[in-house]
């Protein structure tokens, strides 16, 4: 069921990153969970890229019926697949275009979180001492801030802008990955091949980036996948609470719109169920991928 | 004992850091804190008087130490909009939040532990294969969306539960405790609790399941099996007891964590708790109230982190012995 997690010792010649990348790319084929997750990602990326073709209607345009009346609260049908909002906007178009903002928020947060987490984890774990102590205290501090309240306060006061939400999410999420990567570096640092590199006079930066970092890469990837989900849920929650970016069409904004326009009491399920399902799919995809990578690359971390 | 003190200091320092970050964050926000509050009809003298009344004319560092001193006395300042003491407002809504959080967590953990142990026992069956992704999906769903769906189905459609608030209008009670003990309050509490419990059960369930799977391979379980104990007795008496330890710690952490997440649940159900108060305070730029609500949540979080540390030491003797030695 579980492979043994041998660290990928760098080849004597050539760049060590390649075998790791090759193994990472081959992994989804071995694990059905990770494969499903990756498939969901690919699907959403395609929808985001082809949004204009899939839903040519402007998601914020107020639509009218053929008889010239406002097309408000139209039930799902052939013309409007998921019906329209109380202001006559096409819900299906909003759902499709919402994919773009979800992926933008998710990917940018994931890149920041995994980059900062990896660099801090590497530096903290390898050098130890005062650098380590300072970085880990900062991580403790960030972890003792209540997550959603902090994001709300920051976006509430800095302004309802998507980049502020991404910033807040990144500020709070990097410590998780930094801590785990740090502990992994602590064990890698003592491995024989790292010792050998040190003895042969390799510089600290060479050991860090050529010998240790490639082995950390799958972990960074796991935390990036988790961060995508967290960022999308957080953006949705913040939008739902009314602190979202008023200019962007996102799943959170759709849910907030549906909630405040009494779609719940009217039973307009087609308005508020699909955005939630999309969020679940993207977040679950992250869980599946991280689960798959953990099983293959670091079985001891399973279940955390 | 030394270890306990160490954890206490650790958590207290973290809390102090949060307070400091928060203080300067609020002060460095664009616009003066009173911008929304000062009436344009007031003349310069009156504006100045107002700044002095709130202590905003003093230098920043002085404000910070006055603030710290006040916090130690349980004094959170005066709400800009409600013109009442923040402490009074916070204490009014805190019981609602705690009741919501604790009830949901207890239900979620009882269900999660039992279902998790059962799924571990059923490992490899089709039901286990279907249940794990389903549980992951409940963890992936936004809390407020679960609330919206349940609200539409069970409240608006079926009419079983009220759609929001904590009590029906027009009812009067002798005191707050009587109100909380009333059937009306429980009826209002049910749907938010169900939502939160549904969201929270995933963590104890998956944790219990994976712990059970690990414990089942330990020597003492093999020993029990060799002694010829029944499979059920092994599961309950030997494996479950040991698998439970991390779940108990997770419970304590869960109280602190879900207090923060309650922000959205309380908004969906208009539940008069501390999270909804925070949202309202932030949206009207009521700095002292927002700061107070945030700190109260951070305080619960820090306290529960400390409790989790303690539980971890008490329940798993290997931790404290290992570190002492």
Image (cartoon, coloured by chain):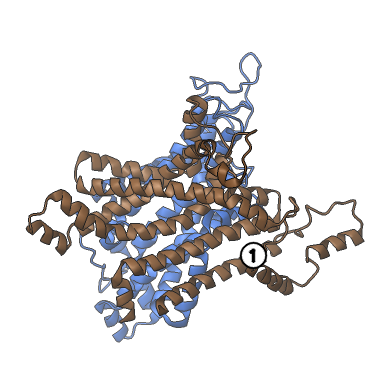
Chain colours: A blue, B brown
Q: Which quadrant, please, contains the C terminus of chain A?
A: bottom left
Give the side of residue A156 with respect to residue B191, left or right: right
Please name the residue shown 82% across and 54% down the image.
Answer: B38
Q: Which residue is mark 1?
A: B74
Residue A146: percent from the left, percent from the top? 53, 58
State whether residue B231 is above or below residue B26: above
Please name the residue shown 41% across and 54% down the image.
Answer: A226
For the image shown, how many numbered marks are present on the structure?
1
How crowded pointer 1 is (Cα within 10 Å; few <14, some 14-19, many 20+) is rated as few
Question: Can the viewer see residue A121 in this picture?
Answer: yes
State whether residue B297 is above or below residue B313: above
Helix, strand or loop status at disc 1: loop
State whether residue A150 is above or below residue B177: below
Residue B257: percent from the left, percent from the top? 47, 56
Q: Which residue is at the front of the view, B8 or A271?
A: B8
Residue B292: percent from the left, percent from the top? 64, 59
Q: Which residue is at the front of the view, B50 or A186?
A: B50
Give the side of residue A237 with respect to residue A126, left or right: right
Please name the residue shown 54% across and 49% down the image.
Answer: B97
Please tell me in which quadrant of the rendered image residue A297 appears: bottom left
Give the side of residue A213 with respect to residue B225, left or right: right
Residue A44: percent from the left, percent from the top? 43, 41
Please name the residue shown 11% across and 61% down the image.
Answer: B223
State whether residue A212 is above or below residue B213: below
Disc 1 sits on a residue from what chain? B
* Residue farthest along the front direction in this orientation: B174
Question: Can the viewer see residue A211 in this picture?
Answer: no
């Amino acid at each position: 069921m579980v492979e043994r997690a041998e660290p990928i010792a760098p080849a004597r010649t050539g760049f060590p990153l390649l075998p790791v990348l090759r193994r990472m790319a081959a992994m989804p084929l071995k694990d059905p969970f990770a494969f499903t997750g990756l498939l969901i990602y690919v699907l959403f990326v395609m929808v985001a890229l082809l949004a204009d073709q899939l839903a040519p209607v402007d998601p914020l345009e107020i639509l009218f019926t053929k008889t010239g009346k406002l097309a408000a609260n139209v039930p799902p049908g052939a013309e409007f697949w998921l019906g329209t909002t109380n202001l006559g906007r096409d819900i299906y178009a909003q759902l499709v275009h919402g994919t773009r903002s979800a992926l933008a928020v998710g990917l940018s947060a994931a890149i920041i979180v995994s980059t900062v987490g990896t660099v801090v984890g590497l530096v903290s774990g390898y050098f130890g001492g005062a650098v380590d102590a300072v970085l880990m205290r900062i991580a403790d501090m960030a972890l003792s801030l209540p997550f959603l309240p902090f994001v709300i306060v920051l976006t509430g006061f800095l302004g309802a802008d998507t980049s502020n939400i991404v910033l807040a999410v990144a500020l709070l999420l990097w410590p998780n990955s930094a801590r785990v990567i740090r502990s992994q570096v602590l064990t890698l640092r003592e491995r024989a091949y790292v010792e050998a590199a040190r003895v042969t006079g390799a510089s600290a930066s060479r050991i860090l980036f050529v010998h240790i970092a490639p082995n950390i890469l799958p972990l960074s990837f796991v935390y990036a996948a988790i961060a995508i989900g967290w960022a999308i849920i957080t953006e949705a929650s913040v939008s739902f609470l009314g602190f979202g970016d008023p200019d962007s069409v996102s799943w959170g904004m759709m849910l907030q719109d549906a909630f405040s326009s009494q779609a719940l009491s009217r039973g307009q399920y087609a308005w508020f169920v699909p955005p939630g399902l999309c969020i679940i799919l993207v977040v679950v995809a992250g869980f599946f991928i991280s689960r798959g990578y953990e099983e293959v690359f670091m079985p001891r971390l399973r279940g955390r | 004992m030394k270890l306990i003190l160490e954890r206490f200091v650790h958590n207290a320092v973290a809390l102090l850091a949060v307070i400091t970050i928060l203080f300067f964050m609020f002060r460095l926000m664009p616009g003066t804190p009173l911008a929304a509050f000062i009436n344009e009809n007031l003349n310069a003298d009156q504006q100045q008087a107002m700044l002095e009344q709130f202590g905003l004319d003093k230098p920043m560092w002085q404000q910070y130490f006055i603030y710290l001193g006040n916090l130690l006395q349980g004094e959170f300042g005066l709400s800009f909009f409600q013109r009442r003491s923040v402490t009074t407002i916070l204490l009014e809504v805190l019981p609602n939040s705690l009741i919501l959080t604790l009830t949901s967590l207890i239900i979620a953990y009882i269900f999660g532990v039992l279902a998790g142990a059962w799924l571990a026992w059923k490992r490899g069956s089709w039901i286990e294969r279907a249940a794990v992704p389903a549980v992951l999906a409940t963890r992936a769903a936004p809390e407020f969306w679960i609330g919206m769906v349940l609200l539409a189905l069970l409240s608006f459609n079926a009419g079983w539960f009220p759609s929001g608030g904590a009590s029906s209008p027009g009812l009067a009670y002798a005191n707050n405790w009587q109100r909380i003990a009333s059937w009306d309050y429980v009826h209002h509490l049910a749907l938010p609790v169900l939502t939160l419990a549904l969201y929270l059960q995933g963590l104890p369930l998956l944790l219990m399941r994976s712990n059970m799977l690990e414990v089942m391979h330990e020597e003492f379980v093999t020993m029990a099996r060799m002694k010829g104990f029944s499979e059920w007795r092994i599961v309950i008496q030997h494996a479950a007891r040991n698998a439970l330890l991390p779940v108990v710690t997770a419970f304590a952490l869960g109280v602190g964590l879900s207090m923060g997440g309650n922000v959205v649940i309380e908004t969906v159900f208009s539940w008069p708790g501390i999270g909804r108060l925070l949202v309202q305070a932030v949206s009207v730029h009521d700095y002292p109230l927002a700061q107070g609500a945030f700190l109260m949540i951070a305080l619960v979080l820090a306290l529960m982190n400390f409790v989790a540390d303690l539980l971890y030491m008490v329940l798993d003797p290997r931790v404290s012995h290992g570190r002492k030695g």
